[in-house]
Amino acid sequence: MRCPQVGVIVIGYNDAAHVTTAVRSALAQGPAVREVVAVDDYSTDDSADLLARLAATEPRLKVVRRRVNSGGCGSPRNTGLDRVTSPYVMFLDSDDVLPPGAVDALLAAATGAGAEVAGGLCVRRELPGRREVPWQAPLYSTHAVFERPAQRPRLVHDTLCVNKLYRTDFLRDHGIRFPEGRFPYEDFVFTARVLAARPRIALVPDRVYVWHVRRSADRLSISLDRADIANWRARTEASRLAYEILLGAGQKELARAARAKFLDHELRIYGRELGLHDAHYQRAWWTHTRAYLAEYDASDWAHNPTAPGRLIGRVVLASPDPRDLPRLRDLASRPARLLPPYAHSPDGTPVWSADLPEVTLEPLLTRPVRLLPLAVDAELRPRARTALLRLRLHELYGRVAQAGPEALEVEWRCRETGRAAGTRTTVTLTPSGDGVWSAETVIHWAAFGNPGSRGAGTWDLRLRVRFQGGAYREVTAHALTSAGLLRRSRRAVVSARHVVVLAHPYATHSGALALRVAPGLRAAMSVVHGRLRRLLHCH
């Protein structure tokens, strides 16, 4: 039997609905857990009472109630660090859970490798649908041990503190703590302090943390609440501090990787959403981002200069005012799409646009075709029980013609389950003579219906462009929405099993074509109600 060696710090504020579930998931890890320190950040709901009742029956549970609310996550975690007595420590938020075996997997890795830090795979579970998305999966694809973080610069991309086990004396000896008070993205700073101290790190492929994402909650988490420009300012400030911490510790390679991560991750997330905000937000975002990116030096831009995040950053720096937002949105998508127009400078060099010739795209001329930001447009033409899907692949400075496009492989995949709708369809690409290759295929609405499903499902269109010689590029399709085309494509049909299916194509936040499907009577009623509302509105 493993000796009790781990303390789990659970923090929460006004989360009576979930906090005891989180605590029980920590206690259920088994005898390796010596203590669970639950820190209540001065909740005004029933959280403290629920924790006290649970502590009365569980001797391993210690409840600490702070006297004032901190407004953030850093202070209660620091409170827990002050109270924990175990050789190793982990962190858990009140609305998340530790999956079975998480502590054992991390503790075995840490003790086996003599590591100060052990990390494992975190999955983001979207609720209520329960779709799971792994976080930074390439880092946790296999067992690995690194003597120093600089051996794996991508470690700066995993800014979470909750999917890791830390040696308590390592944190205390180096004075590693979280920022106090209301400091959004406190994980960025804490993780930078950990990496700056040069720990030995062990990584495992095991699932060790389940991050619950509740986008429909009354109170969004700090990381999800991006409606106000203050959130972006907080994120850039946390990124700046992380860079300065790493640079100040002499970790130049990690510091450079942290700046690259800001371009590839933060800038693309917020760039995709910029068009959803009003003009005031857009101007404030653009001005603040330009000021932050002005701190970058030439070496920060030199590596992979046509990577999507770097291109977005260069456009922002080149223009004093917001511009080309739809094009930037598609470039920020994953995988990236670079939409027309494809401009040239007077000497023939590929550039972002005629208005911004200083943003060069010349490196695209030598980039492998499998990495090019290819643009495919998708247009749905509705019929009675089907729709015609028209696809158009755009030329990109001669690279597409050079590679010889042959076909498009078309697949619809369910976002919630990962299941494909039928078999993958392959359609031939035909050149149209204007720098475009075209293809079309028939979509059967009823094929997406699932009689056993109680709720709506979302289906994403996945494409693979096949070239001569076996090369290919995975892409998504830019949804053409002119003249309300997608709105008119909404259809209620009857499937082969005589089940009513509501099919509603739409454009995602990143501009990609997707399809919402709702089977059953509820789908039919939603169509009836929608038509009644439109009739009443017209009269």
Image (spheres, rainbow, N blue to C red):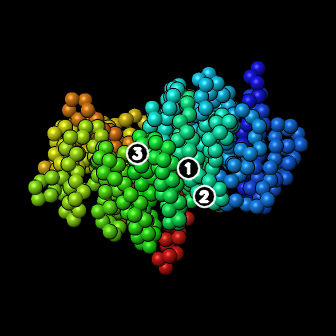
Residue 148 pos. (x, y %)? 50, 32
Q: Residue extending furthest left?
A: 347
Q: Quadrant of residue 447?
A: top left
- Mark 2 or mark 1, which has the lower sequence index? 2
Pick whichever, 150 or 260, lies toward us.
Answer: 150
Q: Residue at x 79, y 59 (%)?
A: 67
Query: Would residue 336 be visible to someone looking at this image?
Result: yes
Circle 2 residue? 183
C-alpha gap between disc 1 and disc 3: 15 Å
Q: Amino acid at mark 3?
A: Arg
Q: Amino acid at mark 2?
A: Phe
Circle 1 residue? 189
The reply to whether callout 2 and callout 3 are in contact (CB within 8 Å) is no
Q: Residue extending furthest bottom?
A: 539
Residue 375 pos. (x, y %)? 28, 49
Residue 126 vertical placement versus 344 (above, below): above
The reply to whether callout 2 and callout 1 are in contact (CB within 8 Å) is yes
Q: Residues within 10 Å of mark 1 (few under 14, many from 20)?
A: many
Q: Which mark is residue 227?
A: none
Q: Quadrant for the N terminus, please.
A: top right
Circle 3 residue? 256
Residue 351 vertical placement versus 123 (above, below): below
SS assignment at label 1:
helix
- Mark 1 or mark 3, which has the lower sequence index? 1
Q: Residue at x 29, y 37 (%)?
A: 370
- Mark 2 or mark 3, which has the lower sequence index? 2
Q: Residue at x 10, y 55 (%)?
A: 347
